[in-house]
Image (cartoon, grey):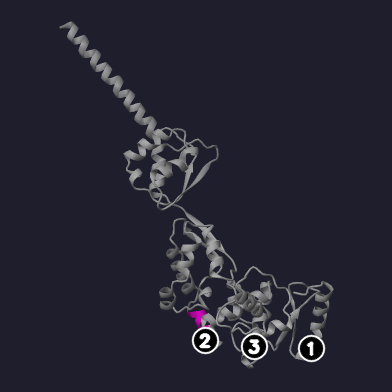
Amino acid sequence: MKNLKKVLWATALLGLVICAIIAYNIYQAVFLPNTAFQNKEAFVYINSDSSFEEVKTQLEPLLKDMGLFEAVAMRKGYASNIKGGKYVLKRGMNNNDIVNTLRSKNIPVRVSFNNQETLNALAGRISEQIEPDSLSLCKAFNDASFLSSNGFDADNKLGMYLPNTYEFFWNTTAEGFRDKMLKEYHKFWNDDRRDKAEQLGLEPAEIIALASIVQKETVKVDERPRVAGVYLNRIKRGMLLQADPTVIYAIKKETGNFDTIIKRVLYRDLEINSPYNTYKYAGIPPGPITMPDISSIKAVLNAEKHDYLYFVADVSNFGYHIFAKSLAQHNRNKVQYVRWLNQQQINR
């Protein structure tokens, strides 16, 4: 009987030891820190179609023990339910926290773009910041059904995208990015701005096209309302806009080379047969020549009221312009600019 008791006690003790070992292993696997990086945090980008093996490969340099992470991931069902996105791992995280983070804590990224001249260029810029590649973005941007159902066409589609900084999830689809930009476009064109456009006798798309010319004419935000006023004065008088940036855009569009740099418009350039050539065709071009800043759009909607009809670059105050009310005055102002171009040997 005594021997039996000893055996029972020994068995119970062994069971407790085994349970303790199992509990410790579980505790170690789930709750002990398992990060290998020294920075406070590490960012992980997981593609929407990633497999668990691909996730493990990405996490390998960041974890001390991949086996323990894998065991917890399998136990919690993460291995069969991968979710794309951008995630932040904190130094000292345990496997339980890591798996929970990868399951449900996709964080947004800030996406910025500036004055792109083509949707292809925009796609390239955006593909550097979120998951979709430039080809899928271009396809979404140029979808004929989307454009026609939302009042855009091949010429004015560029104007739907307002340069700014926005928040997206990194794994946002190409269509998701495009659709949010449409919402931002409609949000910008509220009743107040539409009323101002109507008072000018222009549609929002025409305002954006005109704003793109203002954008190209001056980098000085404080001068943009005055430049916008010049073009609105010309429109009211039935004059040609005669904007050099539209000629430059027409050349780029005809050649297909938007990387070319043209610093000086020549007389022969004014003969190019393009609806974007405002020396040849009256009115506002059929679409924007770049994505204008919001400041340029606001400059058109709130243009300075004056009698100026002409302007030329001010070589004594670079970035700004000298304005004139008459052609004779403008030609006198123009002399100093042409002289400066020749001195700098700017022939193109």
Answer left or right for 249 relative to 74: right
Q: Is residue 166 above or below residue 74?
A: below
Q: Which residues are magenta?
A: 191-195
Residue behind mark 1 = 329
Residue 184 appears at what percent x and percent y? 48, 70
Residue found at x 40% / y 75%: 145
Residue behind mark 3 = 280
Q: Cβ–Cβ below 8 Å for labels 1 and 2?
A: no
Is tag 3's residue or tag 2's residue first in the polypeptide sequence?
Answer: 2
Q: Report, in whole angstroms, how far the alpha carbon at label 1 lies from the one at label 2.
A: 33 Å
Task: Looking at the picture, tell me which residue is in the foreground, 1 or 58.
Answer: 58
Is tag 3's residue or tag 1's residue first in the polypeptide sequence?
Answer: 3
> Looking at the rendered structure, which numbered label has been put on residue 229?
none
Answer left or right for 240 relative to 314: left
Residue found at x 47% / y 80%: 191
Residue behind mark 2 = 198
Q: Amino acid at mark 1?
A: Gln
Image quarter where the C terminus lies is bottom right
Quick one: label 3, few (<14), some, or many (20+) residues within 10 Å? Answer: some
Task: Looking at the picture, tell me which residue is in the foreground, 305 or 346.
Answer: 346
Residue 199: image quadrant is bottom right
Q: Amino acid at mark 2?
A: Glu
Q: Report, in whole angstroms, how far the alpha carbon at label 3 lies from the one at label 2.
A: 26 Å
Secondary structure type for disc 1: helix
Q: Is residue 208 magenta?
A: no
Secondary structure type for disc 3: loop
